[in-house]
Amino acid sequence: MSDITMRAKGYLRPVINENYVKLTGAVVHIYQLPEKSTIVTTIATSGSGGNHTHYPKVTWFGELAEEFMQKVREKDRISLLANVQTKRREREGEKAKYYQNIVGQGFMPTLKKMESAFGLQTGEGQYVEDENEVRLAGTAAHIYKVPDQEIVVLTIRTFTAGHINMPHIRLFGRNAQYAMDNIAEGAPVCATGYAYTNRVEREDGAIDFYDGLTCSSIALAPAEEE
């Protein structure tokens, strides 16, 4: 294990802090919570690469939720920016759990390629490609190796816009091995990935849906000098 990783156990202050989500795709569902200025939208996007389409949920609050309801309908194509927000919940007698949601920060209609490339205001041609990008940078707060599997769940403490969040992201294969070999809790890290969803049918025919964040690249990051 490298010296930088060993020293990271003292919780070095990261130079880079980022908590960023960008999605482009089609709105397939809009759900408005009763008596609240809150909506949850589902976006169909194939922007993570490969042939798989993911359906991440994005939550909108307050004025942004109201604006979304006024301007967007199901089947519309949009591009949006968001971040990953976490909430700590602790019930009496139970271990505290962190829940995470993708929370929308802004949106616009998806551009056509002619408009994106040349600035032409035209409705002709194809839309720009789907996007599904997650960028997290901060401090490795917790590392969990899933028993008997090449899977690591990494919790990254991010500090952006005056807020601390603790998003967790799954690492597979080489990325998981890199984390186990090089990253200790307290190390500054940067990770890129995408929002995933998975549909699993149980033996009794019931359907379970899983979602979260999957890492595509990860690396140790610089720390501020003491």
Image (spheres, grey):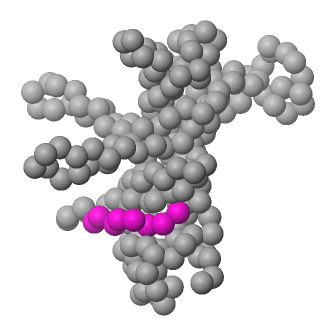
In the depicted structure, whether residue 137 falls above or below residue 114: below
Is 67 or 129 nearer to us in this picture?
Answer: 67
What residue is at 17 percent from the left and 43 percent from the top?
Answer: 91
Residue 17 shows up from this direction: yes
Which residue: 62% across, 64% down?
16
Residue 196, percent from left and from top: 42, 41
Does residue 192 appear in this view?
no
Left or right of residue 136: residue 54: left
Q: Residue at x 54, y 42 (%)?
A: 83
Quarter of the image where the N terminus is located = bottom left
Looking at the rendering, in which quadrant would you find the C terminus?
A: bottom right
Q: Let me know if residue 139 is in the magenta part.
A: yes
Question: Left or right: where does residue 215 sit relative to residue 207?
Answer: right
Q: Main secondary structure of the magenta part?
A: strand
Please say if 203 is above or below 171: above
Which picture quadrant has residue 141? Answer: bottom left
Across and down, in percent, residue 86 comes to: 40, 45
In-image side of 134 versus 196 (left or right):
right
Query: Observer-nearest residue: 203 or 142?
Result: 142
Horizontal relation, residue 156 to residue 114: left or right = left
**Front position in the image: 160 or 192:** 160
Q: Residue at x 51, y 85 (%)?
A: 4
Magenta highlight range: 138-145
In the image, farthest residue toward the bottom:
3
Q: Is residue 211 magenta?
A: no
Residue 65 position in % (x across, y down): 54, 20
In the rendered image, which quarter is residue 202 located in? top left
Residue 219's place in the image compared with 98, above or below, is: below
